[in-house]
Amino acid sequence: MTRRFVPFFSILLSLLIFLSPAYAEEEKNWTKQFQTQIHSWIDTLALRDAEFKQWQNAKTDVQTLGANQHQWLVSITQSGKQVGYLVVGELPSPKGAEKFVLLEYGVGEYILFDDAFAPREIAAEPVYDGFASHWLLTQNPASQMVNAKTGESYPADFTANDPVMNTLSADELVHDGERLTQTRVIKQNEGSPFDQISWVHDLYDATDVTWSQLWQQKGSDPITLTVPMHHSQVLAPFVVGSLHLWNDQYAYVGVWDEGLRFVPYSYAHKVGHFHVNETSSPSE
């Protein structure tokens, strides 16, 4: 009986030996493409937006977000200090090859899934979904979420909404080779959404604000983005600080959240509402 299995295992071993170099080469090429792409995005941000100037010649560290999610967190450091991050995804392209996409990016010392705020529990899984990003603790009798930006623990009975970020198509996201071409500053310095609360009165009667209307707002007109999360058990308001346009086509909104945090406009438009100061009248 043993002899009958020897040829099979010999063939299998030979096949594994034959395939291993090819796999290693493929992995090497993937890593090279990934590193080339993230540094291209870092360089264009550092060149085109003064807020990101400190990204020049910065170091990067990459970690995987979740299992089989094809998402990576790229932390960016300069002289040993945290200065920002990218969240990169990978989507299949029509040609069958994988395409890297820019899901989110931020500047400042506070990044998503920072080790300083990470739960101590071993079974803490990073779950990325834009503003709703969190660590999921599964070791307790009931699952619990911890905010990925602040480390704040949500009540155990809170549950996440269905993911939204992964519903975006490549046509809504910056992908391989895209460059930052236009920037627009709305609020230069970080501010609190509670400095002016006209948006509170607008919560239940919010009008749709298009990208064109956002872009045309005067710098003196505050804009607030409100995002209901966890089945509306949490309302997160953000002050809009800056707008980015990549290749004059792909729109991203930067909000103040312990630093500037940029997400695709299409995502922000799906999960929240923009509120322009009631003294303003956005026009096309």
Image (cartoon, rainbow, N blue to C red):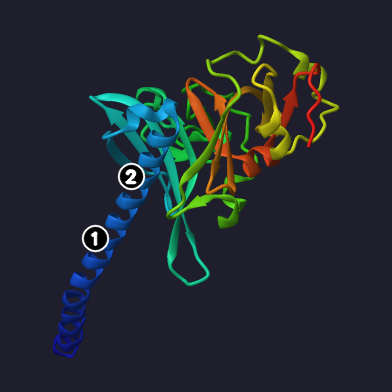
Q: Quadrant of residue 232?
A: top right
Residue under pointer 2: 39
Front residue of 102/138: it is 102
Q: Residue at x 33, y 27 (%)?
A: 54
In the rendered image, the residue lying farthest to the right is 205
Horizontal arrangement in the rendering, residue 139 relative to residue 173 (left or right): left
- Distance between the alpha carbons at the discs numbered 1 and 2: 17 Å
Marking on residue 28: 1
Image quarter (top left, top right, bottom left or bottom right) of the N terminus: bottom left
| For discs 1 and 2, the disc positioned in front in the rendered view | 2
Horizontal arrangement in the rendering, residue 275 relative to residue 122 (left or right): right
Residue 156 visible in the picture: yes
Front residue of 248/165: it is 248
**Residue 254 rendering spot, x and y as whole percentages:** 56, 30
Residue 73 visible in the picture: no
**Circle 1 residues within 10 Å: few <14, some 14–19, many ≥20:** few
Q: Amino acid at mark 1?
A: Lys
**Residue 27 rendering spot, x and y as whole percentages:** 27, 62
Q: Are marks 1 and 2 in contact (CB under 8 Å)?
A: no
In the rendered image, the residue lying farthest to the top is 195
Image quarter (top left, top right, bottom left or bottom right) of the C terminus: top right
What is the secondary structure assignment of the residue under circle 2?
Answer: helix
What is the secondary structure assignment of the residue under circle 1?
Answer: helix
Horizontal arrangement in the rendering, residue 239 relative to residue 150 (left or right): right
Front residue of 89/216: it is 216
**Residue 20 rendering spot, x and y as whole percentages:** 20, 71
Q: Amino acid at mark 2?
A: His
Q: Residue at x 29, y 38 (%)?
A: 60
**Circle 2 residues within 10 Å: few <14, some 14–19, many ≥20:** some
User: How many marks can you see?
Assistant: 2
